[in-house]
Amino acid sequence: MAAAANSFASEAGREMLRAGGSSIDAAIAMQAVLTLVEPQASGIGGGALIMYWDGQRVQSYDGRETAPAGVTENLFLRSDGAPMTFSEGQIGGRSVGVPGVLRALELAHREHGKLPWSRLFEPAIELAEKGFPISPRLYTQIAADKFIPQSSAMAGYFLTADGKAKAVGTILRNPALAETLRTIARDGAQALYTGPIASEIVQQVNASRNSGTLSLADMSGYRAVERSPICSDYQKWKVCGMPPPSSGGIAIAQMLGTLQALAIKDPRYSLETLKPNVVTSAAGSEPNADALHIIAEAGRLAYADRNLYVADSDFVPVNLKGLTDPRYLAMRANLIGPKSMGKAEAGIPPGTTVALAPDRSPMRISTSHVAAVDDFGGAISMTTTIEAYFGSHIMVRGFLLNNQLTDFSFQPSENGRPVANRVEAGKRPRSSMSPTLVFDKKSNQLVGVLGSPGGSQIIEYVSKALIGLLDWDMDVQAAINMPNFGSRNGPTEVEAGLVSPGLIQSLKERGHEVAQIEMTSGTQVIVRRTRPDGSVVWAGGADPRREGVARGD
């Protein structure tokens, strides 16, 4: 089975699986197609974080972008020392990090690929040459983006002669991308990091308005990294997620551990008994008020720790053991009561020795997710991104470059203390991407593959889906469709239009400040299910909030 945010990508993934490919083969094919059909969210000009199961062991591959050697921690400060606005930092070469996704895919393929590298790009090359219809979501994003007209390459591709977004269904052809992918298919990922493609990337980044400092040495020197995944016990399952520079694996481990400790302390807060309420709405059900209350409170605590302690662990000592210590999480659970705590403070995990300032950067939204399982017992969960919609708005040879450096804190220090996620040369910005694998703790059998786009909201989306699948034993699609909710240590967020007035009132009675907002997840899920006759199948689901689909045999 293969699942992605666009049917063309899902179909490319299934084609590779049918041809005898592994889940990494499917993911590479899906990423190549997403570069074409979902250019606003991900592509070869960005980065990715990968969780991989080969049937025997869990691995994580870090393809996060890196900051060029020429940057300083003042990258996003104005001349008067004040932080730039987001768009001031985003648009142009200043925000571009060295792309990492192809190096990470190459590293994983070298270990687990079954099909030739060149075969994996064929669907995307063919689609780029023949063209694909502009989808409603892509049209909406083009029409809403006020910076596209400032890029001649983007305007020529996405807009009509009179400057309007090309209509839904318009066939878009991208021969430049087809040629780029053909070169990468023939010469490997190296083709992006050295030679003419790399030279053009560097030239455009440094010649753009709001220029950057990217060099050929930055490009050729990029390395993807295999890291040790974060695996923690949750009831009868083992949940494995991505380590730093992602904050997702830590935050989800913290949330689940806190909720588990809370249920032990007070059985009334056992999520297993606080199942969703069936309501008449597009979502089909909504969370129980008590369940939403405690999940939001656990989220506050996790986000508070995230903003103080988590960054690229190659640059900042991240106390993984202390942050996920069950005794520490039990202490944090003691802070959750019948009324909302409002804004949580970061805790002091055992073993903490570094004095840091919190990251006060605004929370942002972006990204795409793919998932696949293969015939060999393998599975992949990969979250991939160019950061904000359309990235830096620099288009090179048919694809867009990321604006990933804006995931660093714009403010490098506060009151003499450094922010862990400040900009530093060679550093990878902190992410919320949460590709996740779930196993039966007793048998070590894979039972679930999931993840979502959504910037800093990803942690909310993935934790909601996990709780729906594990605690509430929901149908895959129902767990995805359920209204999104949570807290990033600000207001308690609920998905606008999908929750009842009664639920909102119940939250307010528990002391919550409630924000009804757009929460456009793009969750892809594949889970192992046992039929009534005892046969085992994969059940897949994709998020209706985007244009995702799961394809299986």
Image (tube, grey):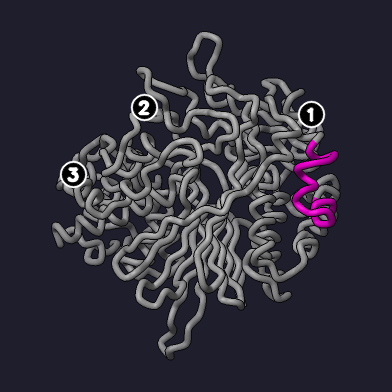
Dot 2 falls on a residue whose secondary structure is loop
Look at the image and give the residue range highlighted in magenta: 181-198
Give yes or no for residue 183 being in the magenta stretch.
yes
* Residue 521 place in picture, x, y as percent: 49, 50
Per the image, the residue denoted by label 2 is 357
- Amino acid under label 3? Leu
Per the image, the residue denoted by label 3 is 335
First in residue order: circle 1 vs circle 3: 1
Q: Specify few, some or many for label 3: CA neighbours under 10 Å numbering under 14, 14-19, or 20 or more.
A: some
Indicate the quadrant where residue 516 lies: top left
The CA distance from mark 1 to mark 3 is 52 Å
- Amino acid under label 2? Ala
480 vs 51, nearest the viewer: 51
Per the image, the residue denoted by label 1 is 203
Q: Specify few, some or many for label 2: CA neighbours under 10 Å numbering under 14, 14-19, or 20 or more.
A: many
- Looking at the image, residue 80 lies above or below residue 405: above
Q: Is residue 451 at all visible to an observer of this figure?
A: yes
* Residue 95 place in picture, x, y as percent: 62, 29
Indicate the quadrant where residue 444 lies: bottom left
- Amino acid under label 1? Gln
Indicate the quadrant where residue 247 lies: top left
Residue 13 horizontal side relative to residue 320, left or right: right
Would you say the residues marked 1 and 2 are in contact, meaning their CB atoms lie under 8 Å apart?
no
Q: What residue is shown at x 42% (from left), y 28% (from top)? A: 419
